[in-house]
Image: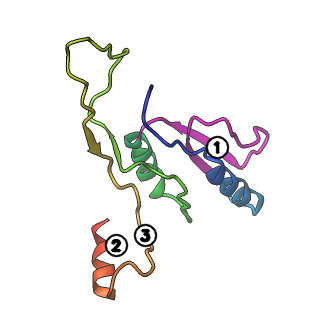
Amino acid sequence: MRYLGNRSSGGQGIALAEAAAAAGATVHLIARATDIVPPADNQRITVEKVETTAELQAAVQAKAKNVDALIMAAAVADFRPADYAASKIKKTDDGPSPVITLERNPDIGLFGLQVGRYPSRPLAMSRIRSR
């Protein structure tokens, strides 16, 4: 197994970018490597590729300062492996099984909406401010 994951196709984000461009917006699409790509002839869409959550966070923070609207469709993993192996981790007959340690990914959301999760407005507002 190369990794544990449930990678998104990126199709929803690309569809949203195409719809915004079709409505006349100039779009900067931040996306991971994906098989689905926006049409190359669409002059309203520029694409910035990222691989890691840290790269995504940096790109979003840099671009969010100078936009009229921000649509965030990425499904970012809550956790990532604490360590990466450059090559296969080989098993040994007498050695212990490797332990995969996870660490939290940063929250990238700049704002949020959660309906029905909090019993009161003050608790909901506290949660939004903490992000």
Q: Residues within 10 Å of mark 2 (few under 14, many from 20)?
A: some
The number of callouts visible is 3
- Judged from the image, the secondary structure of the residue bearing numbered disc 3 is loop
Where residue 50 sits in the image (x, y, percent)? 49, 37
> In which quadrant of the rendered view does residue 35 lie?
top right
Residue displayed at 28% across by 86% down = 122
Query: Does 127 sit above or below residue 47?
Result: below
Task: Single out the residue that lies furthest toward the front.
Answer: 93
Q: Which residue is mark 1?
A: 46
Query: Which numbered dot is residue 112?
Result: 3
- Give how far across and how far down residue 26 sits, in percent: 67, 55
Instruction: Tell whether 127 sits left or right of 33.
Output: left
Quarter of the image where one finds residue 43: top right
Disc 2 vs disc 1: which is toward the camera? 2
Circle 1: residue type: Thr
User: Which residue in the protein does label 2 denote?
Assistant: 128
